[in-house]
Amino acid sequence: MHRQFRASVVEAVKLTEEICSVGLKADDIGASAVPGQFLHIRCGDANLLRRPISISDIRDGVMTIVFQVRGEGTKWLADRRAGDVLDVLGPLGNGFDLGGKNIILVGGGIGVPPMLFSARAAAGRATALLGFRDKSCVILNDAFKSFCQNVIIATDDGSCGVQGPVTLPLKKLLETGEYDAVLACGPRSMLRAVTELCIQATVPCQVSMEERMGCGIGACLVCACRTIKDGREEMRHVCKDGPVFPASEVVW
């Protein structure tokens, strides 16, 4: 059950030139959150719409969000410091089903941070595949290593880890037949490619979709996406029905 609350900033860290991490004190709220859910944050009086940001991790009563500065709202959020208080709505949406003995977590770009919460929840059962543009964009590598059996980095230019898209190592892992679930978050093109590989390997896949949002609670149609359920195509809300969907139900 989501609710509106005020959260104190306990830490604010710049991970790269564009990526920031903010820790929020949220003891009781954090206890109800599950991997894959997000927060809807009011970013100053000048920005009418809240910003949806996935929960990256929860530890010792601190809920961490990691986001890319893309506009005025996220720039305002990146300027917050310890002691500041944020107006937050959440946790929102449906999260990942972490069932499975051997899980592959796939993250691409700013879709990497939301998978850390899943890595913690599936500690000892997951392998993480993390894709970035280049070495300067790599984040949270050590954090994933704390929970995952194996962490594989892929960069477009090969400056860190495997060269090429993260789907290259994913294909090899799926071919072993050792994995029974794939969870993914990242660019739509990556999610589509991940879905196609999982269909070929007959491995269940869940994807966290990203769409522009308005209300964050399913009252508007800003984040509607095309899906197929029970053989019929229908529009569903990413904020309310998702952001996590069975990959087989998404119309790509």
Image (spheres, grey):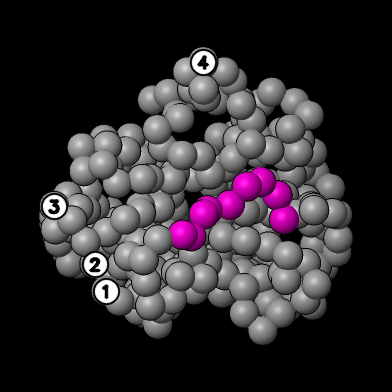
Q: Magenta segment: does it hold 46? A: no
Magenta segment range?
A: 91-99
Instruction: Say which label, 3 or 1, has the lower sequence index.
Output: 1
Q: Nearer the viewer, mark 3 or mark 1?
A: 3
Q: What residue type is labelled 1?
A: Asn
Q: Which element type, helix, strand or loop, lies under badge 4?
A: strand
Name the residue located 40 percent from the left edge and 50 percent from the top edge.
184
Q: In this view, does 98 lie to the left or right of 77?
A: left
- Residue labelled with disc 4: 232
| Residue, far top | 232
Secondary structure under the numbered disc 3 in the rendered image: helix
Camera-side residue of 14 and 52 = 52
Indicate the amino acid at tag 3. Glu
Q: How far apart are marks 2 and 3 (CA)?
A: 16 Å
Question: Residue 79: x and y, percent?
Answer: 66, 64
- The answer for how far apart the CA atoms under marks 4 and 1 are is 39 Å
Q: In this view, does 155 lie to the left or right of 12?
A: left
State the image quarter where residue 194 is shown: top left
